[in-house]
Amino acid sequence: MIRETLKSSTFSDEKIKNLIIPTEKVAHVQQNNSLEHALLVLVKSGYTAIPVLDKESKLNGVISKALILDSILGLERIELDRLHSFKVADVMNSKLATMKMTETFAKALALSINNPFICMIDADGAFKGILTRSSLLVYLNQELFQKKK
Ligand code: 4BW
């Protein structure tokens, strides 16, 4: 029974919709921001990686502390001036896990194996928020072990 529900429930369903962290609560940067700004946001928010959006809130990619550090490594020293001269667009990863709100919990679970978070988009490609691995696990734990059958 639970298996069937997980297989067919989509993120448009009230029951699992609230697993999504909405856009306004997602730490993010824009692709024309400097690497210095992105590093500040990452350090202050405490997250390893965050989405990159454009001015219209469309998704462009993901930026991480690791990508930034890698981009400022010179041959023999850390080139701190690159933090000012490079933009987020220069180093972000454009490959990211995305899902439409009309797709299923089962797909999200499978994607979360290799992605700490999944970016949710609507039918027009507008960013709606993120689905984290922890929120999927919390829901699964609740459905499998904490609900009275
Ligand atoms: O600030 C934090 N608050 C809480 N409650 N938990 C945190 C925080 N920072 C990290 N964590 C925990 C979470 O369990 O460490 C895990 C790994 O964090 P990450 O990846 O490497 O920064 C967190 O796991 P998660 O909740 O499953 O989140 C997976 C990834 O999703 C995070 C981060 O890259 C992204 N993320 C989560 N919430 C976000 C966010 N990105 C932007 N804005 C948010 N609000």
Image (cartoon, rainbow, N blue to C red):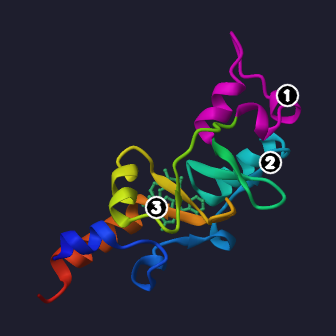
The front one of 46 and 33 is 33
Looking at the rendered image, the disc whose residue lies closer to the viewer, 2 or 1, is: 2
The percent position of residue 48, horizontal first and vertical second, equals 55, 48
Determine the residue positioned at 44% across, 80% down.
Answer: 13
Residue at image mark 1? 81
Q: Residue furthest left?
A: 149
How far apart are the alpha carbons under marks 3 and 1? 33 Å
User: Which amino acid, by three-letter code, is at mark 2?
Assistant: His
The stretch of residues the image draws in magenta is 64-91
Dot 1 crowding, Cα within 10 Å, few <14, some 14–19, many 20+: few
Does the numbered disc 3 mark a residue whose Cβ is under 8 Å from ligand 1? yes
In the rendered image, residue 103, in percent from the top left (x then y), is placed at: 45, 64
Task: Name the one closer to the observer, 19 or 50.
Answer: 19
**Rendering coords of residue 41 (x, y %):** 71, 54
Q: Secondary structure at mark 2?
A: helix
The residue pinned by badge 3 equals 132
Cα distance, mark 3 to mark 2? 24 Å
Question: Could you tell me how far apart the alpha carbons at marks 2 and 1 are, in whole angstroms?
Answer: 13 Å
Q: For the point 39% across and 43% down, which residue is it?
A: 114
Query: What amino acid is labelled 3 in the image?
Result: Thr
Judging by the rendered image, the residue that carries numbered circle 2 is: 37
Where disc 1 sits, the SS reads loop
Q: Amino acid at mark 1?
A: Asp
Of the numbered discs 3 and 1, the one sitting upstream in the chain is 1
